[in-house]
Image (spheres, rainbow, N blue to C red):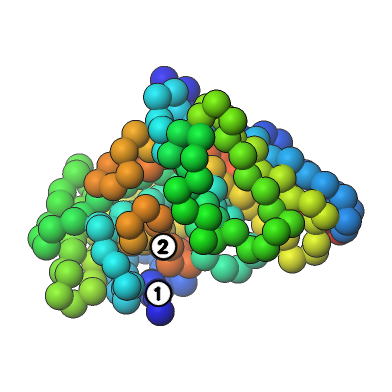
Amino acid sequence: EAGVTQFPSHSVIEKGQTVTLRCDPISGHDNLYWYRRVMGKEIKFLLHFVKESKQDESGMPNNRFLAERTGGTYSTLKVQPAELEDSGVYFCASSRVVSGNTIYFGEGSWLTVV
Amino acid sequence: GQNIDQPTEMTATEGAIVQINCTYQTSGFNGLFWYQQHAGEAPTFLSYNVLDGLEEKGRFSSFLSRSKGYSYLLLKELQMKDSASYLCAVTDTDKLIFGTGTRLQVFP
């Protein structure tokens, strides 16, 4: 069974540019999560999809971040325009059910904004 | 507020036992996870505790006390490959709240 896959693994962009991160969850997992880790800090929740619906987007930093999951399969996270403080590792995770079950993480997309 | 505390770094010797503590204060609680993360890799699930007590899985065990807001991860018979970051995370409704992680270095 393939794990959670993320693309790109690394991205370096200039301030003001746009970046789109993609996540393919494990097949059959309705729950998809985005998390972010900025340098030296803990991993923080961004948002949670159940199928194609946003269940909880309370962790999204601001309106420069847009997440979509059309069709309830893969998800994209777009940052537009990117700022220096957006640099970090963006993790995607998926699970079959919401609670009491294993949440599987991808290896993350490393974003550097210069 | 939400707060998860764990030591930043720990060192241990190959073959030894190490205990990584985690204390938490969160508005909600649906369980506590421990993840292992090697540099540049995905966090990998180790354990999940929702009831008080000890869960044992091979060389790794995890303990939870909900009344004390406390958990620990116990690693026995340490191997060099156990050098990694260990993340404590509490589930609050649908999201994981992470600590900053404990970086464990195992020396020969």
Q: Which amino acid does label 1 sit on?
A: Gln
Q: In this view, does A14 lie to the left or right of B36?
A: right
Q: Quadrant of residue B62?
A: bottom left
Q: What element carries label 2?
A: strand
Q: Which mark is residue B2?
A: 1
Is the residue A63 above or below the residue B1 in the image?
Answer: above
**Residue A109 at least partly seen:** no
Kindly identify the residue that appears in the image at 13 percent across and 58 percent down: B51
Q: Residue A80 carries which label?
A: none
Residue B34 x, y percent position in the rendering: 33, 54
Dots 1, 2 in contact, CB < 8 A = yes
Q: In this view, does B24 lie to the left or right of A1?
A: left
Residue reaching furthest front?
A53
* Residue nearer the viewer, A113 or B39: A113
Residue reaching furthest left?
B53
**Residue A40 at least partly seen:** yes
Chain letter, disc 2 residue: B
Residue B48 x, y percent position in the rendering: 25, 50
Chain letter, disc 1 residue: B
Sequence-wise, which precedes: disc 1 or disc 2?
Answer: 1
The count of marks equals 2
Kindly identify the residue that appears in the image at 67 percent across and 63 percent down: A62
How far apart in space, not on screen, are marks 1 and 2 (Cα)? Answer: 8 Å
Q: Residue B97 carries which label?
A: 2
Mark 1, Cα crowd under 10 Å, few <14 / some 14-19 / many 20+, is few
Is the residue A51 above or below the residue B2 in the image?
Answer: above
